[in-house]
Image (cartoon, rainbow, N blue to C red):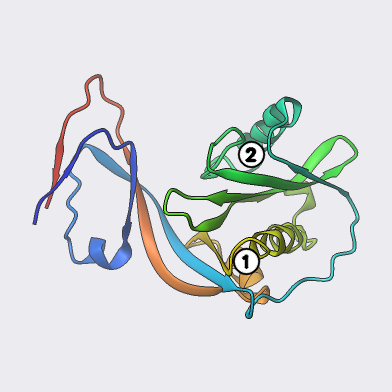
């Protein structure tokens, strides 16, 4: 089985497809991450009672916040899948302690029209305080006012995050792997076996 890929910079494949060796990416792509896919519905969502300790912010387009969020993600979660300025972002949510961002989450609408929580990140000095659950709960609550289901992807090795999402009612529905195209001077078609 051959798949022709032209102009693709990143791709994701179900773990089962990778295990069956359907995609043999060769030297054009390198494995980036293994993920678990989670989903929550309006019926299964367990809204968290949040006692705000920090200033809450929400942003879609704000030039000042754009650089602050991107700098925060670069320092605290460099493998985040979404940065401020991505056109798929519906809204950013975050907590700030004074002028310092301490947690973020993005609500995105993928090209498939699925709402997805992305780039959940907490400053390393503020971890283990429930902020990831709080920011995910706020973004999920807002997203579920727009659609009956919300999805998110989490690194397969991030067990604390997976436990946090499960306490909010998210269920693991599958696994996938992401791949990134190696940088080359010219782009060409790759064949996948």
**Horizontal and vertical percent for residue 37?**
47, 65
- CA–CA distance in space, label 1 to label 2: 19 Å
- Residue 160: numbered disc: 1
Front-most of 123 and 47?
47
Q: Residue 193 has which mark? A: none
Identify the residue under disc 2.
73
Question: Is 153 left, or right, of 18 in this rendering?
Answer: right
Q: Earlier in the sequence, mark 1 or mark 2?
A: 2
Does 70 sit above or below residue 105? above
x and y percentages locating residue 72 in the rendered image: 69, 36
Q: Kindly identify the residue that appears in the image at 32 percent across and 62 percent down.
A: 14
Residue 191, by quadrant, is top left
Q: Nearer the viewer, mark 1 or mark 2?
A: 2
Labels 1 and 2 touching (C-beta < 8 A): no
Residue occupying the point 46% across, 65% down: 36
Quadrant in which the N terminus is drawn = bottom left
Q: Secondary structure at mark 2?
A: helix
């Amino acid at each position: 089985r051959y798949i022709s890929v032209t102009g693709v910079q990143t791709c994701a494949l179900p773990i089962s497809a990778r295990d069956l060796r359907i995609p043999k990416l060769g030297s054009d792509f390198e494995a980036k991450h293994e993920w678990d896919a989670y989903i929550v519905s309006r019926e299964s969502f367990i809204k968290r009672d949040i006692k705000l300790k920090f200033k809450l912010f929400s942003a879609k387009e704000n030039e000042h916040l754009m650089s602050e969020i991107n700098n925060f993600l670069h320092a605290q979660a460099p493998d985040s899948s979404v940065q401020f300025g991505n056109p798929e972002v519906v809204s950013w949510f975050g907590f700030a302690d004074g002028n310092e961002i301490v947690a973020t989450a993005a609500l995105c609408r993928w090209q498939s029209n699925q709402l997805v929580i992305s780039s959940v990140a907490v400053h390393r000095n503020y971890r283990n305080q429930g902020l990831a659950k709080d920011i995910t709960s706020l973004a999920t609550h807002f997203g579920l006012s727009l659609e009956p289901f919300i999805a998110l992807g989490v690194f397969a090795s991030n067990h604390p995050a997976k436990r946090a999402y499960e306490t909010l009612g998210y269920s693991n529905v599958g696994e996938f792997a992401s791949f990134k195209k190696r940088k080359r001077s010219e782009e060409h078609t790759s064949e996948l076996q």
